[in-house]
Amino acid sequence: MASNLGELLLREKILSVDQLRSALEFQKKNSLPVGTSLVQLGYLTEEDIAQALSRQLGYPYIDLDQFEVYPEVISLIPADVAKKHMVMPIHRIRSFLTLAMVDPTDLEIIEDIRFRTGLSIQPVIASETGVVNAINKYFGTADSLRVKKIIEDIALADDSPVNIVEPDKDDYDLTDQQAEAEEAPIIKMVNQTFIDAIRRGASDVHFEPYETTFRIRYRMDGDLYEIVNLPLKYRSPVISRVKILSNMDIAEKRLPQDGRIKMRVKLENGKKKEVDMRVSSLPTLWGEKIVSRILDKEMLKLDLTQLGFEPESLELFQDAIHRPWGIVLVTGPTGSGKTNTLYSAVSTINSPDMNIMTAEDPVEFNVPGVNQVQIKEEIGLTFASCLRSFLRQDPDVMLVGEMRDLETVDIAIKAALTGHLVFSTVHTNDAASTVVRLVNMNVEPFLIADSLILVVAQRLVRRLCKKCLQPHVLPESALLEMGFRKDELKGLQVMKPNGCDSCNKTGYKGRTALFEVMKVDDDLRDMILNRSQSREIKKKAMEKGMLTLRRSGLVKIKKGVTSVEEVLRETVRDEN
């Protein structure tokens, strides 16, 4: 097979004899296909090889990304065979199967597929990346395949050890339910689901029951992706297993519950990773929905320079968190990265001579050297009561998870005015509207003006995949409408997502933050005292050089960090 491919490429004169010899040695040493060896050595691209094979053999070259394959065609070849031989069935007409192949010179593979399917094989040529992406799309990744295999094993077994207890039955037996949740196939399926999510870098796993199906989804880089849709009979045992792992009461299905799981996972490179999971159950119309938030310490960026701050905004933020007293507020919707920013600030100033205390609901990550308190409102341990206790604990810095009510805000302001530095979060659209939000909570403007030193608004946007981003041609009028200045258009190159194996065909990999940092100076204090509107405060802050969320997004578009679509989705145009 290797020699056939090599000879074809030599005949095409796109490969030298020395390069082929080197590739064959590399192939033997690393146990790789010769085509992969040529690509890894940088002699040829996958596209070069595919196009050369097409010319020499007369088989058409296709882009698998442009094809939609029907389930009945996919089912003709098992997933493990497709991955082993690097082939993808794409079309069937009567007794003929069109088969996308990386190397159609391998007659043994063609004969194997013909024998398995009983069909005549019509090869077409596709790139290796295209085949891998198609296999992952239609069959799933290696970890997803293992989940599906376990499910198939359960379904095929006549004497399945899983006994389903319908949730609507009155004779609910806790002992039976716990026993069925402990059965090996369900344990394997739940464990493999979590392992797959952790390896993919997912932030959340959703277990969702509906009328006729039970769906599992992952949140990756801020977006939800459906992983598998299971028959409804898996709902009860899977939910019970997750609840047992997170120390919830599996007999209680009428009320929401919270729990935690600590899991150690062996990664593909042999390393072990330890993650915490915050688990929440919620009774819905069709049964309990469970969401597991994966708290991966390795994903927590504590270096302020890595969060996405522009240099001028970072300078303002660092100056504020090193002040001896005052309030620093971080604002934004749920899931905008506020917790990460606050942890980064705390970690930056954390030192043996500082007494730092936090009140959080929940405590997401443990920070060495910081005294962290878990809020438990059901027993009276609220943010306000925690803050009162903190003041008797000789604190230097206090972090309050959220300014939820007037009592909490009042204590935080008094703490700031008596020589303490206070960090907290609120939920507002931008930095300027935070002031109006505090006034609406019946906080006196003079208290806000005297205690507030900085407000940070933020949003998360997806990063473009560096391996597959490509230029995005837009008319000048569209760029100007977004907020770019006329003088910025010269030489401006906007990039857009494409999609490759590295980014799971999304075109994005990872996330970064957009920041709007508003320093409260004397002019803004006067405006706060005069109860100015948020748009007036924002306009004054912009005159003084504040970078808005939209401007922060435009800067990242110019640098090729993110796309136009991401910035437009998360920000609004600044008024002139």
Image (cartoon, helix red, strand yellow):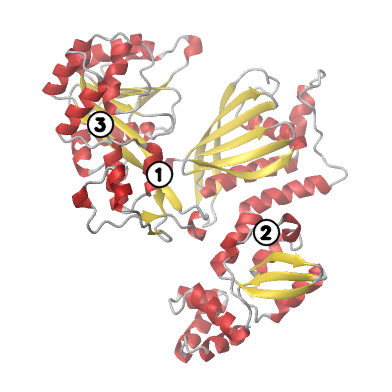
Residue 101: image quadrant is bottom right
Residue beneath the point at 27% across and 42% down: 483
Residue type (three-letter) at the residue carrying disc 3: Pro
Question: What residue do we see at 81% from left, 21% from top?
Answer: 169
Residue, disc 2: 69
Determine which residue is flagged by label 1.
566
The mark total stands at 3
Real-space CA distance between mark 2 and mark 3, rounded to the nearest whole angstrom: 61 Å
- Residue ranking furthest to the front: 477
| Residue 98 in the image, given as x and y percentages of width and height | 71, 70
The residue shown at (18%, 38%) is 315
- Does the image show residue 455? yes
Where residue 180 sits: x, y (%)? 77, 33
Disc 3 is placed on an element classified as loop
Q: Earlier in the sequence, mark 2 or mark 1?
A: 2
Q: Is residue 1 above or below residue 281?
A: below
The residue mark sitting in front, 1 or 3, is 1
Name above or below for residue 63 compared with residue 483: below
Q: Quadrant of residue 300?
A: top left
Q: Which mark is residue 352?
A: 3
Quadrant of image for the C terminus: top left
Residue 393 location (% of width, % of height): 29, 15
- Which labelled disc corresponds to residue 131? none
